[in-house]
Amino acid sequence: MGSLQSLCSTEHLDASCSQCQYSTPHTKQLSLWSLPPLLVLQLKRFELSTSHGTYQWKKLSHSIDFPVHGLDLRGLLSPIDGGHDDSEPCTDRCFIDALDPRVRRGIEYLQNELNIPLSSASRSCTKYDLYAVVNHCGRGISSGHYTAHIRRPDETCWWLADDTVVTPLSEDELSPSTTAYLLFYVRQDVASGATELSDLFPTN
């Protein structure tokens, strides 16, 4: 999706040193060092605007085109330093050792202190498939109606859940959409069973 590429594009900033006051150009860029097994994207459907000195939320109903199959986030991954080819298999230790020391300390804190594991599988597969969509129909953030488009893991057909009414839905009706609000993706290796969630997040 072009919006994700734009979010992670390089931003050029002008800043001054707090001590010498010398102005020099800087760049800032958002990137990902690993990819989650499940990905939830919230689309910007509401914008805070001013009218006669008061603030109010405005509904954005522009059409958004999003992929149903094969959303590839490889281009958003941070490159691994140290000369390692990211296309080759990399063990957890190898991956951590190749990172910037500051990033490495943060990862080791997550693993050792918070017991949050890092798996190299989170970089080996970069493609996602859509499995659910939450839609918002209405004119404001405090009103409206929510529906959902869902697909069971063992099925290819889609369903529209509208309160207690569930009806079949054609995949072609999913995207583009003027009401899609939340997009739920599953990484392809997890969806196929090649990687188990228990392997990525062991309990012991």
Image (tube, rainbow, N blue to C red):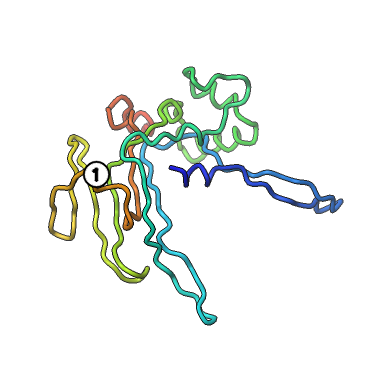
| Left or right, 201 with reference to 77 | left
Using the image, determine if residue 43 lies above or below residue 35: below
| x 17%, y 47%: residue | 169
Q: Could you tell me which quadrant the C terminus lies in?
A: top left
The quadrant holding residue 195 is: top left
Q: Position of residue 136 (x, y in %)?
A: 30, 61
Using the image, determine if residue 189 lies above or below residue 67: above
Q: Could you tell me which quadrant the N terminus lies in?
A: top left
Q: Position of residue 64 (x, y in %)?
A: 38, 51
| x 40%, y 48%: residue | 41
Q: Residue furthest bottom?
A: 52
Of residues 21 and 171, the one drawn nearer to the viewer in this rendering: 171
Pointer 1 residue:
172
| x 52%, y 38%: residue | 32
* Amino acid on which disc 1 is placed: Asp
Graded by Cα atoms within 10 Å as few (under 14), some (14 to 19) or many (20 or more), the crowding at tag 1 reads few
Q: Residue furthest right?
A: 20
